[in-house]
Amino acid sequence: MKIPDFSFQETLDNEAKEFFNWIRILVNKGKIAFGSVVDGNHGENIEGEHQVIADTGDANTEFSVTHTLGRIPTGYLVTSNNKAAVVYTGTTTWTSTTIYLRCDAANCAISVFIIP
């Protein structure tokens, strides 16, 4: 992959320079990294937070997942699941500290990456 020439960056304002600097970091790394899947860890070069849920409880019953993003998340990615099960969004409104999910199988151990 050819690395783009960002020499035109000198004529941009600070906000645009910062944006292109992040693009350069991603291009040079060649990937987006989520970081280690450890409870509470933030993504390596992507914004978000890992949360590990040891037991989702009864099937199709809402459970809460706390986070420290400081704002209401926009979504989540299930990064691991120990059973053939679907994790889906609960009905309770998310907050700046908690999201609510459900799982269609009982007692799953899952990890999710919460996206701000």
Image: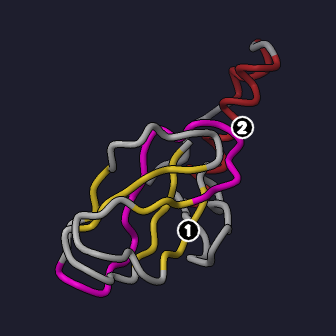
Q: Mark 1 falls on what kind of element? A: strand
Residue 50 figure quarter:
bottom right
Residue at image coords 67%, 41%: 22
Asked whether residue 77 is drawn in magenta, I would say yes
Estimate the x, y position of residue 95 in percent, counting from the top left: 57, 39
Where does the magenta region start and end?
66-84
Looking at the rendered structure, which numbered label has been put on residue 42?
none
Looking at the rendered structure, which numbered label has been put on residue 51?
1
Q: How many marks?
A: 2
Residue type at mark 2? Answer: Asn
Residue carrying label 2: 21
Disc 2 crowd, CA 10 A, few/some/many (<14, 14-19, 20+): some
Estimate the x, y position of residue 74 in percent, counting from the top left: 46, 38
Q: Quadrant of the C terminus?
A: top right
Vertical order, 72 against 55 (above or below): above
Estimate the x, y position of residue 63 in percent, counting from the top left: 42, 62
Residue at image coords 48%, 49%: 2
Residue type at mark 1? Answer: Gln
33 or 64: which is nearer to us? 64
Q: Is residue 55 left or right of residue 32?
A: left
**Label 1 to label 2, Cα distance in Å?**
29 Å
